[in-house]
Image: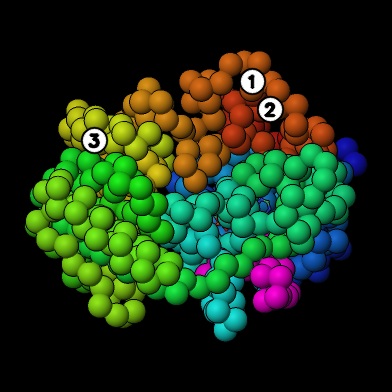
Amino acid sequence: MGATMATRRDLVNALAAVVGKRYVIYRPEDLRVYEYDGTIDKSTPHAVVLPGTAEEVAGCIRVARNFNIPVTPRGAGTGLSGGAVPAERGIVIGTPRMRRILEVDPVNRIAVVEPGVVNIQVSETAAEHGLFYAPDPSSQRACTIGGNVAENAGGPHCLSLGVTTNHVLGVEVVTPDGEVTWLGGRVPDPHGYDLRGLFIGSEGTLGIATKAVVRLMPLPATVTTMLAIFETVEDASRTVSSIIGAGIVPAALEMMDQTTMTAVEAGLACGYPPDAGAVLIVELDGLADVVGTEAKLAREACQANGAREIREANDPKERELLWRGRKGAIGALGQLAPNYYILDGVVPRSQLVETMTKVSAISQKYGLSVANVFHAGDGNLHPCILFDEREPGATARVLEAGAEVMRVCVDAGGALTGEHGVGFEKQQFMSWLYSDTDLENMERVRPAFGNEGRFNPCKMLPTGTGCGEMAHQEQAVRAAGPEAYV
Ligand SMILES: Cc1cc2nc3c(=O)[nH]c(=O)nc-3n(C[C@H](O)[C@H](O)[C@H](O)COP(=O)(O)OP(=O)(O)OC[C@H]3O[C@@H](n4cnc5c(N)ncnc54)[C@H](O)[C@@H]3O)c2cc1C
């Protein structure tokens, strides 16, 4: 089909022929919902389509190819790097209709799920067999397994158990040329190249996951959850290295600073001490004897670094309250400012104290308030810059401060992302870590999966085609009239 002649109506009709008109979204007011994710960038798609099967996904991809327009996969839109934002417009393929848990196999400890299944539902369903799905992003009440696979999501309990790639055995994928195929399967370590591993974390650039085989773990026999309270972020940061240095890898080791606790207490009232400089949530699980010994060592490490108090959750209800505050912390920041910009840098644990000091200096330099809530055990920082996007120049200042923080992480020997992905947001920083040759080699993977540049463009690699032309394209769309494509 000649793309220059095609109208939005042609596109909608072609998509409706695949999924039914009900599942094609095209009215401007409805499309607004799909122009953003959890971060700052925005771009409105031409249409959104909600297929119900892998075959329908393939059909929608073929329509996009015929119209020569981009495809952007989307789960729940909770992503924090602009991954689901349709940077060059085109169609968004959403997965909310594909939300069945198809199988729970307690003997082999696996579940087969569709991509639109919300993360926490896997553990809730597996619990009746004494099992759970380990990766637990703080957004787990909203984010989908498809989005988790694409971002190789982590979570508080990934410190000892590993992130999504360690818990997904196989993925059914519709490739960017519309082929339905399996990468990996129901057993670990299949022969041949690990294409499953390549797909997980590919940020929606190598296809759309339409099923996943996930690994289930037995629920731990004993869990101890402690809240260690410190006067300063530095003391809490030092404690992180001390705990791991004592030979313990806790199930979770999370930090929140005073700004975050103020927001949590205002919104969720979980009993955190709002006058403290920082707290660590230290969770240990396993056999009772081991947990007892490790808890003693962890307590000693906290005390040695100046903890003013260590509280222990006495029952599941108290434990749940401690976690509710941590997992709801980012949402609670809305109590403090209308907008926040969450960063996702990684530093070696030994660099935590120094890095946190530098983050604080950047916040002062730009006159911006920063809340810190993060996976301290992994050295995975999430400075959240609080701001009001209605203030002229505020967004630009926030992005500049954010870039400085990312540079600090890279200079400390760290990485650009621990779990949120590079997405649209950080692609231009990739050259801080990779040479042109490295990036070109990564780019070469895309055509092998059938992505010739129109499948989630402008994400992850700065070598994508046409990303700098976004504004130009918007202008051309306007000039050509609302119905026409460019
Ligand atoms: C309050 C809050 C807390 C968070 N905490 C964490 C955390 O602790 N750990 C963590 O890792 N992340 C966290 N996140 C980030 C986010 O929730 C994760 O990145 C999550 O994996 C995104 O899932 P989603 O369904 O919302 O995906 P989306 O945002 O819709 O998409 C994310 C990426 O996945 C791609 N994608 C979506 N579905 C598919 C599919 N079926 N096949 C192929 N590609 C697909 C998209 O194109 C995009 O590139 C948090 C976000 C928020 C808002």
> How far apart, in angstroms, are the residues tagged by discs 1 and 3?
31 Å
Q: Count up the numbered dots.
A: 3
Residue that numbered label 2 is attached to: 442
Disc 2 is placed on an element classified as: helix
* Residue positioned 53% across, 26% down in the render: 430
Residue 87, given in percent of the width and then of the height, sits at 60, 39
Q: Residues within 10 Å of mark 1 (few under 14, many from 20)?
A: few
* Residue positioned 81% across, 61% down in the render: 54
Nearest to the observer: residue 367 or residue 230: 230
Amino acid type, label 1: Asp
Residue 55, given in percent of the width and then of the height, sits at 85, 61
Nearest to the observer: residue 439 or residue 369: 439
404 shown above or below 88: above
Q: Is residue 257 left or right of residue 160?
A: left
279 shown above or below 192: below
In which image quadrant can residue 437 be found? top right
* Residue positioned 79% across, 50% down in the render: 190
Residue that numbered label 1 is attached to: 438
Question: Quarter holding the N terminus?
Answer: top right
Magenta stretch, residue numbers: 102-121
Residue 312, given in percent of the width and then of the height, sits at 22, 69
Tag shown at residue 353? 3
Amino acid type, label 3: Val
